[in-house]
Amino acid sequence: MHANLAVPEASPVVLMYHRVCADGDWRGSDFVVEASVFRRQMIWLAEHGYWTPRLSDVLRAGGRAPCLAGRPVLLTFDDGYADNLVNALPVLRWLGFTAAFFPVLDLHRRTNHWDTAPELRVPLLSVEGMRALEDAGMELGSHTMTHARLTRASPNELADELARSREVLASLAADPLPVVAYPYGDVDDRVKDGARAAGYEAALAVNSGPLEMGADPFEIRRQRVGNSAREAYLRLILSGAEKLYAWSKWKVAMHLAAMRRHDGDPPPLGTLGAQPM
């Protein structure tokens, strides 16, 4: 009888997208990717042996995913743009990919009201659109009620943004993810404590958090993918090199912030460097 061989595992790189717009609708935002560009990026992943485990499965496994089916990579989409249903979902289904979507859950305001530039204002997913994503095999988590900067919220506002968005998600999703994606990647210890108190089991940051997913499930680091990301950049972020560089900068910033607190200065507002949408 042959001995059982251990299945190789890895801590997946977590890619962060926002809006996937129709070709020609791009307006110079770092958080918008054209449909044809997104399609090429996903094809590149498939052709280079990447597969997309479900975020819920990776979290249950302590931040690890098996490598036998290829190299694991997690796809996440913030804000909940309506055109993700048209421009991202068909590509994901065609390639057999899964992803986790994190919509803003104030159902009375279905545009990205936090963007001040009028040319960037577009519709957000309806309840029916969110359910269509889940019916297609995607997962749904929370991006708070109003896309608030959580480190600047009062205690009551923080609790409301986290708890009420989870309640709204539970009312519309069959199997909601107990995961919140922090707007702007804006997080500190108070925000993490608030997420735990609201019943979340994990949370997604951006430019902060440890290298390994399982090291701090309430500050999971992600890599943003923009419209200019071609093969060389995809190789860079998936190699872990950019992640290591960003983590090193974050560690230095955290060390300097700790020194300032020790010297009696007030702590910085939020995590240094965490500014995405």
Image (tube, grey):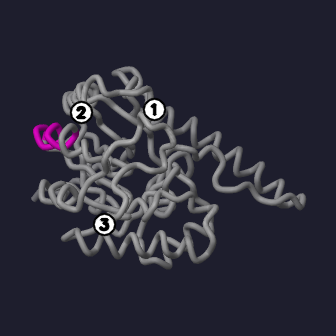
Answer few, some or many: residues within 10 Å of disc 3's Cα (few below 14, many 20 plus, some between 14 and 19): many
Residue designated by label 3: 177
Mark 3 or mark 2: which comes first in sequence? Answer: 2
Q: Which mark is residue 43?
A: none
Residue designated by label 1: 30
Q: What count of labels does the image hold?
A: 3
Q: Nearer the viewer, residue 110 or 167?
A: 110
Span highlighted in magenta in the image: 88-95
Find numbered disc 3 in the image and state the secondary structure of the residue it sits on: loop
Amino acid type at mark 2: Met
Q: Residue at x 18, y 54 (%)?
A: 133
Find numbered disc 1 in the image and state the secondary structure of the residue it sits on: loop
Q: Say if mark 3 contacts mark 1, CB within 8 Å.
A: no
Residue 52, given in percent of the width and then of the height, sits at: 24, 46
Q: Main secondary structure of the magenta part?
A: helix
Q: CA distance from mark 1 to mark 2?
A: 18 Å
Q: Which mark is residue 42?
A: 2
Q: CA distance from mark 3 to mark 1?
A: 26 Å
Residue 217 shows in this picture: yes
- The label nearer to you, 3 versus 1, is 1
